[in-house]
Amino acid sequence: MTNGWTKREIRDLTGKVAIVTGGNSGIGYETSLALAENYATVVLAVRNINKGLEAVDKIKKEFPNADIHVMKLDLNELESVREFAEEFRKKFRSLSILINNAGVLMPPRKETKDGFESQFGINYLGHFALTGLLLDLIIKTPDSRVISIGSISAHNIKPEFKEFLGAKKKTNTRKCYAQSKLACMYFAKELQYHFRARNIDSMSIACHPGIAQTYIFGKGSRKLKTRLTRASLKVIGQSAEAAAYPILYAATEYSMRGGEYIGPDGRKGIKGFPTELEILNEQFVENVSNNLWVLSEKLTGVTYKF
Ligand SMILES: NC(=O)c1ccc[n+]([C@@H]2O[C@H](COP(=O)([O-])OP(=O)(O)OC[C@H]3O[C@@H](n4cnc5c(N)ncnc54)[C@H](OP(=O)(O)O)[C@@H]3O)[C@@H](O)[C@H]2O)c1
């Protein structure tokens, strides 16, 4: 239990460089705001630079001294991920916090530029590539952390990654979203395993935000828009700010050891204060996770060099 942890408890992050993918909107925005408020240098890694600049303006209105940057990253395209990593490397010498937050839910578009089913490609494979391309910086930065975002939709389901990876196959988009989020959760555990096996002191932690009324629901297919109305989300869910707490807790709390799964402590995990959850350990299948890693390296062309 975390005794009602909120962002007020975030420590001074002076000197820490953080990347938040999708930091212009929703949970990513609230995460970026809180990190900047606590003196981290924050890079908003966004697909739309103008939206990123608007977010910077908003953050600077609240915290004029915020050290905040915008850089282009389109997870829909592996080339863009490579360009981002290269540019980041030119500008920064360390990376303390990588928050792999950006995501899409049941989008109308089906394939990424590289031909992957789009949810699997953007939510998971793009972040797998990004982390691998920045790995040396992460490893050489003391107390660095990689945070992956899961979802309640991935709880109590079986991994069927291979089935959902093929873009050409007829896939159920709702199931595909859940599998893409489960892949992010598996990735977090597998990365932590690699760190620990090599005595690397970087940490990999998974978390989920519960349910929050953000733009992600409005960008989905028409069916999703009518089903999950903004009003009902507001009633059952929590604010984007509160939904960012599990991420912020995982990214900043001293008590983290690596390998945890953090989520809201309320009923069914929909809302509440961040706490450590057992469910990922219970549903984790080690050899499946290992196979996913090998396949992801092959599909993205990014080999992890520890
Ligand atoms: N909201 C929830 O209830 C909920 C529940 C479980 C998990 N999550 C997870 O929480 C994370 C944040 O979602 P959110 O609710 O805050 O939704 P959101 O407001 O729609 O934010 C998603 C962010 O991802 C960015 N993004 C989408 N496609 C991208 C791409 N190809 N390249 C780079 N960035 C891209 C979006 O950019 P644009 O602004 O340009 O579209 C936006 O900044 C996601 O991983 C989501 O799966 C959310």
Image (tube, grey):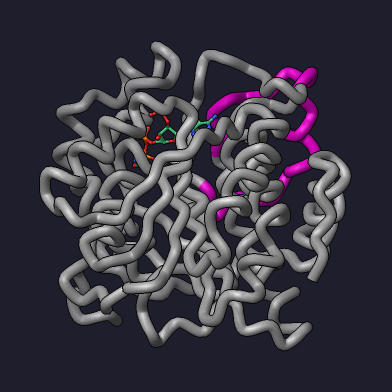
Location of the N terminus by quadrant is bottom left
> Which quadrant does ligand 1 occupy?
top left
Q: Is residue 23 left or right of residue 154?
A: left
**Residue 283 percent coordinates (x, y):** 62, 64
Q: Is residue 105 above or below residue 142?
A: above
Of 164 and 9, nearer the camera is 9
Query: How many discs mark residues in the rendered view?
Result: 0
**Residue 151 percent coordinates (x, y):** 46, 49
Task: Please check the rendered image and state whether residue 191 is part of the magenta-colored stretch, yes or no.
Answer: no
Residue occupying image coordinates x 58% and y 25%: 173
Residue occupying image coordinates x 25% and y 74%: 10
Q: Can residue 269 be spotted in the picture?
A: yes
Of 181 and 232, nearer the camera is 181
**Residue 130 percent coordinates (x, y):** 65, 48
Q: Is residue 239 above or below residue 268?
A: above
Asked which quadrant contains residue 230, the reply is top left
Q: Is residue 256 left or right of residue 83?
A: left
Q: Can residue 155 be spotted in the picture?
A: no
Location of the C terminus by quadrant is bottom right
Q: Is residue 103 above or below residue 108?
A: below
Start and end of the magenta stretch?
A: 154-177
Task: Please check the rendered image and state whether residue 166 is part of the magenta-colored stretch, yes or no.
Answer: yes
Residue occupying image coordinates x 67% and y 46%: 86
Q: Is residue 22 left or right of residue 126?
A: left
Residue occupying image coordinates x 50% and y 25%: 106
